Amino acid sequence: MLRNLPEGATFTAIMSAPKGDDESAETKEPDPELVALLDRKSWTEDRRLMAQLINSVNALLRYLPQWKEGEAPEFPVVGPAEWRETGKADTPTPKATTVMDVLKLFG
């Protein structure tokens, strides 16, 4: 029965979380193991796919319309913690692209 638990089950999340030795150190920041556990529990495959869809739509909204210089909206990256940490570094700055340029790419 344990093998057939859904991906977001607490037991499955606990068993897939990395085990650390340093439990005695007290910090004001949240426990990384707990954050990893909650990430694994809450970001299942279907939710990751929906987050990718939302991020794609946000990218289209940022690049397709004719925004004035410097007025393109900034959307936060939706998804697990590793996406949010790397999302800002991987996003290129938008250049002035017209709708015709995009349509030329599609033929």
Image (cartoon, grey):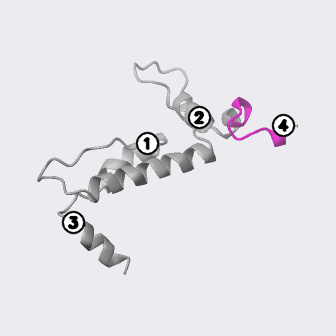
Name the kind of residue labelled 2 in the image: Ser
Mark nearer the viewer, 3 or 4: 3
At 21% from the left and 49% from the top, the residue drawn is 72
Q: CA distance from mark 4 to mark 2?
A: 19 Å
**Start and end of the magenta stretch?**
2-12
Sequence-earlier tag: 2 or 1:
2
Q: In the image, what residue type sits under mark 3?
A: Thr
Q: On the image, numbered disc 1 is attached to which residue?
A: 78
Looking at the rendered structure, which numbered label has been put on residue 2?
Answer: 4
Q: Quadrant of residue 36?
A: top right
**Residue at the outermost bottom position:** 107
The question of residue 5 being in magenta is answered with yes
Residue flagged by tag 4: what amino acid is it?
A: Leu
Pick whichever of labels 4 and 2 is earlier in the sequence.
4
Can you say whether 32 is above or below 54 in the image? above
Specify the quadrant that holds the C terminus: bottom left
Give the class, few, some or many, for how many residues have Cα within 10 Å of label 2's Cα (few <14, many ≥20): some
Residue at the extreme left: 69
Crowding around mark 3 (Cα neighbors within 10 Å: few <14, some 14 to 19, many 20+) is: few
Q: CA distance from mark 2 to mark 1?
A: 13 Å
Residue 10 in the magenta stretch? The answer is: yes
> Which of pointers 1 and 3 indicates the residue nearer the eye?
3
Q: Residue at x 40, y 43 (%)?
A: 84
Q: Horizontal placement of 23 versus 69: left or right?
A: right
Q: Marks 3 and 4, how far apart in space? A: 52 Å
